[in-house]
């Protein structure tokens, strides 16, 4: 997910992912090419899914708008060229403007999708003041009309994960309250957690190792019996 997020940074795009895999593996190695190809395949599959979903939502909206208009459109007065075209076809030749119009209608807009256009364009090199960070979300907000599908993908991939805390726990002065899961832990697990925390925060680590697991279990059971007898 981190590599995918860097692709949606207009300053990096796929160049950063390629450099990352070449540094992690060797340049032009099978591993780096395979990883880069897997990232590209994942991006294309995600783009197709988002594109289908957005086209479906816009298609439903256009159909509802079309159904609301019940009256048929008035006959246009621009029927002269169509009639002229029929007359021209009867004579066995075609006018070049009609041929060109058909070619434009068949070709339509640019056949490249947003992902290909975004990947082929040069990376952004913003000139920022010292201490000013580049706002990626603002860039996608500005270019949303050009990259409609990619902007939706960037909004989901660049979302910041946050965690919520109950107000009574955040502003309580009585101390932390253990949740039911933590209060149901066995004394063995609690002791392991406490020993692990003490070991992590200790300045001096004990280098002596215990030989067997039976000795560890015997020590734990001994401490348990001592605590129960107190």
Image (cartoon, rainbow, N blue to C red):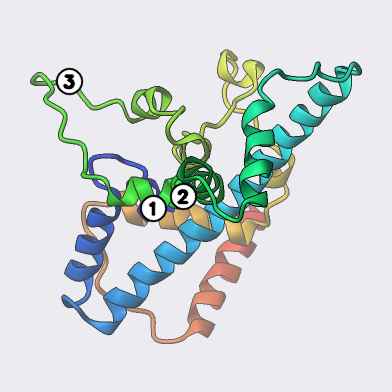
Q: Earlier in the sequence, mark 3 or mark 2?
A: 2
Residue that mark 2 sits on: 113
Q: Residues within 10 Å of mark 3 (few under 14, many from 20)?
A: few
Residue 111 x, y percent position in the rendering: 46, 52
Viewer-nearest residue: 40 or 95: 95
Q: Position of residue 174 (x, y in %)?
A: 60, 17
Q: Is residue 185 left or right of residue 7?
A: right
Which residue bears the numbered disc 3? 132
**Could you classify mark 2 by the number of other residues whose Cα lies within 10 Å: few (under 14), some (14-19), or many (20 or more)?**
few
Q: Position of residue 59 (x, y in %)?
A: 73, 36
Are there few (<14), some (14-19), or many (20+) residues within 10 Å of tag 1? few
Residue at 39% from the left image edge and 86% from the top image edge: 211
* Residue 9 point in image, percent of width and height: 31, 41
Q: Are marks 2 and 1 in contact (CB under 8 Å)?
A: yes
Can you tell which mark lies on residue 116?
1
Residue at image location 30% in from the left, 25% down from the top: 135
Relative vertical location of residue 150 with respect to residue 212 in this rendering, above or below: above
**Label 3 secondary element:** loop
Counting residues from the start of the chain, the first of labels 3 and 1 encountered is 1
- Measured in 3D between alpha carbons, the distance from the residue under mark 2 to the one under mark 1, in whole angstroms, is 6 Å
Q: Is residue 31 left or right of residue 153?
A: left
Evaluate whether residue 197 shows in this view.
yes
């Amino acid at each position: 997910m981190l590599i995918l997020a860097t692709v949606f940074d207009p300053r990096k795009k796929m160049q950063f992912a390629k450099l990352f895999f070449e540094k992690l593996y060797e340049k032009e190695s099978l591993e780096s090419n395979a990883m880069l190809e897997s990232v590209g395949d994942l991006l294309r599959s995600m783009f197709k899914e988002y594109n289908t979903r957005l086209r479906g939502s816009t298609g439903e909206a256009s159909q509802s708008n079309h159904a609301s208009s019940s009256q048929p459109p008035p006959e246009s007065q621009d029927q002269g060229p169509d009639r002229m075209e029929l007359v021209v076809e009867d004579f066995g030749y075609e006018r070049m403007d009609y041929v060109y119009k058909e070619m434009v209608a068949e070709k339509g807009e640019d056949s490249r999708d947003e992902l290909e256009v975004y990947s082929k364009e040069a990376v952004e090199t913003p000139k920022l003041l010292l201490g000013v960070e580049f706002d990626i979300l603002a860039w996608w907000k500005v270019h949303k009309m050009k990259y409609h599908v990619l902007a939706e993908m960037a909004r989901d991939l660049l979302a910041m994960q946050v965690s919520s805390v109950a107000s009574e726990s955040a502003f309580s002065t009585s101390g932390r309250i253990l949740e039911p899961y933590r209060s149901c832990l066995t004394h063995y697990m609690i002791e392991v957690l406490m020993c692990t925390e003490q070991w992590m925060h200790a300045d001096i680590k004990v280098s002596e190792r215990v030989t067997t697991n039976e000795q560890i279990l015997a020590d734990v059971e001994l401490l348990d019996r001592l605590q129960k007898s107190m």
